[in-house]
Image (cartoon, helix red, strand yellow):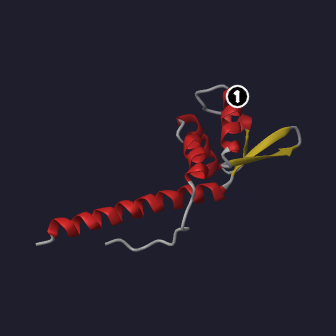
Amino acid sequence: MHVPVPIPVHIPVREAAPLFAALGDRTRLQLVARLCSGGPLSISGLSRSAAVSRQAITKHLGVLSEAGLVRSRRQGRECIWELEPRRLDDAHRYLERISRQWDDALDRLRVFVERP
């Protein structure tokens, strides 16, 4: 049996779908990982050792920004991108809710199967 995790009663799918769609792309997921480990970075910092162009990274950052996963700020002539941790928390809570639902369904199945 699992330990219950406090999860909001309802995280609407319409809010979660764009979040997971943005994270569903390998390049965008790599950008999020870089921002998690490296802190705020410029486009040139994010472009280093990337398999795509700076222009592609800019487009991917736009998708991540629309999903609320990153935000930017001007620092001199550069745009610095940073992670929006609240949205990753939203993703975590949504996945925890789904996990809890699966655990509950498996517990019901176990009770049903083991019933004399």
Residue 111 placement (x, y as % from top left): 22, 70
- Rendered-image quadrant of the N terminus: bottom left
Residue at 44%, 58% in the rendered image = 98
Q: Is residue 97 left or right of residue 109?
A: right
Element carrying mark 1: helix
Residue 4 placement (x, y as % from top left): 43, 73
Seen from the viewer's position, the closer of residues 57 and 62 is 62
Seen from the viewer's position, the closer of residues 27 and 47 is 27
Q: Is residue 99 left or right of residue 36?
A: left
Residue 6 placement (x, y as % from top left): 51, 72
Q: Amino acid at mark 1?
A: Arg
Looking at the image, residue 97 lies above or below residue 45: below
- Rendered-image quadrant of the C terminus: bottom left
Residue at 34%, 66% in the rendered image = 104
Seen from the viewer's position, the closer of residues 56 and 101 is 101
For label 1, the crowd category at 10 Å Cα-Cα, with few meaning under 14, some 14 to 19 and many 20 or more, is: some
Residue at 71%, 37% in the rendered image = 62
Image quadrant assignment for residue 57: top right
Image quadrant assignment for residue 10: bottom right
Please give the residue where the numbered disc 1 appears in the rendered image: 54
Looking at the image, residue 31 lies above or below residue 11: above
